[in-house]
Each structure stands twice: as structure tokens, then as C-alpha cells.
Image: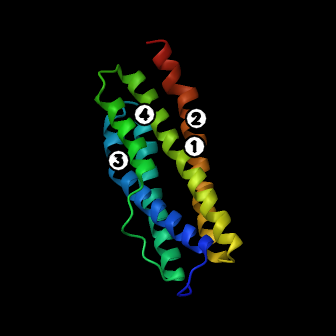
Amino acid sequence: MAEEMNPLEELLVDELKDLYSAENQIIKALPKMAKAASAPELRRAFERHLEETRRQVDRLEQIAESLDIRLTGKKCKGMEGLIEEGKEIMAEDLEENALDAGLIGAAQKVEHYEIAAYGTARAHAAMLGYNKAAKLLQQTLDEEGATDKKLTALAESVINVEAVHA
């Protein structure tokens, strides 16, 4: 990136730092969510998403290297709040199926935040002509959308049905 960044470049750098912080917070939260889940398929979904999230961090690092920027030094307050909500659900004395339903809801809030953030960053990277960055951001955006769909399917097929009939 040039010494003098234009405002859209500055915004993109800020968005990338925010995403980097968010993903690293998710890496810390997912093992706790997996441990709290009682349904084996939900636990597996959280464990798979942990591996995927690590690859997404690698992608962000590739982007940072290609743009010659540092991603550290910013805390994503939005993700911090969403993870805090998830912790509150885990702290409640809920029956197993209700807890799983709550965990799915918390995870989907996280996914929707990421979908919005990655979509914005991808659009800004594309506008600036950073095609490699835009492509990598799109790859992660596709994964986040797929994870959201998987969580919806889990909620509809197993978890929420069992919570209702408990």
C-alpha cells in the first residue's frame, strides 16, 4: 500500500484488523462452545468450524502480507459482545437441548456479523483493485454462509425439535 492511503484504503485496513481480532476471539470461544454442546453433531460442527476459522486467519494474514499492513492492535468490540452473549447462555442452567438451541443462536449471530463484515471488506478491496484480497475475502465469505446454513439445518432437524419436545 502507498505511504498516503486514501480514505477507502484506511477503512479497508480497519475492517481487516477488526476481522482479524474477531476471528482470533472466535478461535478462543469455539472450544468452550463445543465442550458445552450436548448434541454430538453440534459439537462436531463447532470443532470443524474451529479448523476453518484457523484457515480464515491464515487468509487474512496472506492479505496483510500482500498489502504490506499489520493486522494487530485493534479489538473487535462487536465480536466481543456476541461472544459475551454466548457465555451468558452457557452460564444459564438450561436443559441440554435448550442449551444447544441457544448455542446455535449465539453461533448464528457470530456468523451473520462475519458475513456482513467480510462482505463489506470484500467490496472495498474490489473497489480498490485489490483483486487477490477480494478473492480471498470472498472465499471466507462463502464459508461463513455455508456454516450459517449448516447451523440452520442442525437447528431445524435435531436441536430445536428436541428442545420443544423435552
Which residue is at a point 40% across and 35% down the rendered structure image? 40
Q: Mark 2 or mark 4, which is nearer the start of the sequence?
A: 4
Which residue is at a point 54% across and 38% down the rendered structure image? 151
Helix, strand or loop at mark 3 = helix
Question: Residue 113: where, in percent of width, then height?
Answer: 53, 47
Up-down relation of residue 67 to residue 118 (above or below): below
Q: Mark 3 or mark 1, which is nearer the start of the sequence?
A: 3
**Which mark, residue 87?**
none
Q: Could you classify mark 3 by the number of other residues whose Cα lies within 10 Å: few (under 14), some (14-19), or many (20 or more)?
A: some
Up-down relation of residue 159 to residue 24 (above or below): above
Question: Residues at badges 3 and 2 in contact (C-beta under 8 Å)?
Answer: no
Q: What's under tag 1, amino acid-wise?
A: Asp
Q: What residue sits right under mark 4 in the picture?
A: 103
Which residue is at a point 59% across and 51% down the rendered structure image? 115
Helix, strand or loop at mark 4 = helix
Q: What residue sits right under mark 1 in the picture?
A: 148
Q: What residue sits right under mark 3 in the picture?
A: 29
Question: Residues at badges 2 and 1 in contact (C-beta under 8 Å)?
Answer: yes
C-alpha distance separating marks 1 and 4? 13 Å
Q: What's under tag 3, amino acid-wise?
A: Ala
Which residue is at a point 52% across and 63% down the rendered structure image? 15
User: Residue 93, located in which quarter of the rendered image?
Assistant: top left
Q: What residue sits right under mark 2 in the picture?
A: 152
Question: Residue 78: where, in percent of width, then height?
Answer: 45, 48
Helix, strand or loop at mark 2 = helix
Relative side of 44 to 134, left or right = left
Up-down relation of residue 53 to residue 6 (above or below): above
Between 91 and 124, which is closer to the camera in this rendering? Answer: 124
C-alpha distance separating marks 2 and 1? 6 Å
Q: Mark 4 or mark 1, which is nearer the start of the sequence?
A: 4
